[in-house]
Image: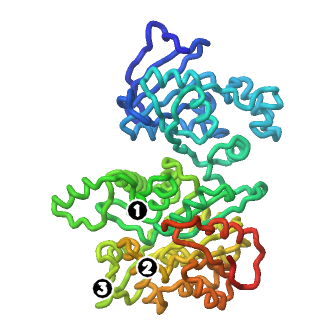
Amino acid sequence: MLTPAGTGIPETTVRTAHGVFRCLAFRAEDGVEHLALVKGEVAGVEPVPVRVHSECLTGDVIGSRRCDCGEQLQLALARLGSSPIGVLIYVRGHEGRGIGLVNKLRAYQLQDAGLDTVEANVALGLPVDARRYEPAAAILRYLGVTAVHLLSNNPEKAAGLAAAGVEIASVERLETTPNPDNLAYLRTKQTRMGHRLTGLPIDLTDRGRHPTVVGIGGGIGASRLWAQLAGSDAVGSLTLVVNVADDVWMHGLRACPDIDTVLYALSGRQDPVRGWGLTGDSFECMEALRRLGEDVWFHLGDRDLATHLLRSRLLAEGVGLTEITARLAGALGVPARVLPATDDEVRTVVRIAGGAEIGYQEFLVQRRAADDVVDVRWAGLDASRVGPEVLDAIGTADLVVLGPSNPVASMLPILGIPGVSDAIRASEARVVAVTPTVASVPISDEGEARRARSRAALLGARGLAHRASSVARLYAELIDAFVVDEADAAESDEIAALGVDVVVARTLLHVDGAASRLVPSLLELARREPTVSGVGA
């Protein structure tokens, strides 16, 4: 498949804006020459992060905005440059998905006349995608790479490489920010070619038969539900609006616990035992800080630190939290759009008995939610601004779900951002809340017990009991329906008296047992016209 380019396989070192790579050139039997950039020692290591990039002269070299190829190339180099190992294979002969440069420009002419990228190729009598991946597979074998962590949004690329003998251990999305010139092109790739693109603005003319869902809330409880929604084939698109009032600056870094819990859960990286942080993470850095005399009460894992380091650097450079979160979600392969509720800093402040005011993380983590709480307020909330992406998502949703998050610490600071509750009221979507509180099930796990103590203390500060009906009362003016756990079904009549429909389902998704009907019940609500309040199954 590969022949020596000249005498043997030439290899040198190149220094790029994203790091230093070994650079190798190959010539295939058909005479087409290909390039490999290699970071670190990859032979015998598995899986290796790999980007197989199809040549695109207009995007890669000229910087054309009609496609996302050049931006994907730079994202891939940045991703591999920040990794100890990785390979980028630049496959030539793939111009225009294999139809060549001249035919690509002819296809562009047809697209200018109104055809999409698939229709244009067909109108020219050309294949929609003529790319072959045997040369890339042969290069990987030459490099000693046996299994890859593929950086791609295209399932067909993964299938093509697998058919050529490459073991695909995992896939990571590499999604760029759309622009007005490539939005229609990206939508075509998403809807007609199966590319996994989650950050596109919603197209109101092509929403399909599956509901568009917006989830509001963050943290461990909500992340369990969001992960199931993200994995459901019955969801058209999923946007998650996540709380930032739990955020904390620690060791000079901005940690966003609710956002990160959602990102890790939806990318399959969440520690299933703790419910937060990355599975298999270590805490050597925290131990070293402790030995240096630091009071380490908020633990950041060693790999988790990379998220906070990148976020904090980008914030210092003036990048907004929404853009940073989109970049993190894309790099982690999150199959949903994740939006901070606001780019502004909002802080939950807890006043405890004795008058002292402390941050929420200090109350929950350092003091283990053991204090009597007198009051709760949100510093910066009144001056905060909701992002247009959040308002657009709510305004075009079929279903808005208020997740099973701490109602006072996580939900009220989202709903209290000026414009958010008004957008929910104005939306034509069905609005349903899922209880975060199950009073009739005993708790044995200390982490779950601490979170329950926190909910109870903060609800108590507002004169409410730690019950599902209390949470329903908080949300009653915004919601059409409320999901109560089957263990607390006795509260259904009390909740229905608030003027909302009641759905009974198993909401404790982390507890072993029969499969929960929660997600199907939620999606059924999106298709149902508002009814008289009552108990549903």
Q: Is there CB contact under 8 Å for labels 1 and 2?
A: no
Task: Tell me the tag on residue 356.
Answer: 3
Label 1 crowd (10 A; few <14 / some 14-19 / many >=20): many
Q: Identity of the amino acid at label 2?
A: Pro
Which comes before the other along the chain, label 1 or label 3? 1
Identify the residue at image location x=67%, y=39%: 66
Can residue 409 be seen here? The reply is yes
**6 to 264, vertically: above or below:** above
Q: Would you name the residue on which mark 2 appears?
A: 442
Q: State the separation of the CA atoms marked 1 and 2.
A: 21 Å
Q: Identity of the amino acid at label 3?
A: Ala
Q: State the separation of the CA atoms marked 3 and 2.
A: 31 Å
Identify the residue at image location x=29%, y=61%: 251
Quadrant of the image containing the C terminus: bottom right
Number of numbered callouts drawn: 3
Where disc 1 sits, the SS reads: loop
Task: Tell me the tag on residue 276.
Answer: 1
Residue 111 image-quadrant placement: top right
Task: Tell me the tag on residue 312.
Answer: none
Residue 443 image-quadrant placement: bottom left
Left or right relative to 249: residue 285: left
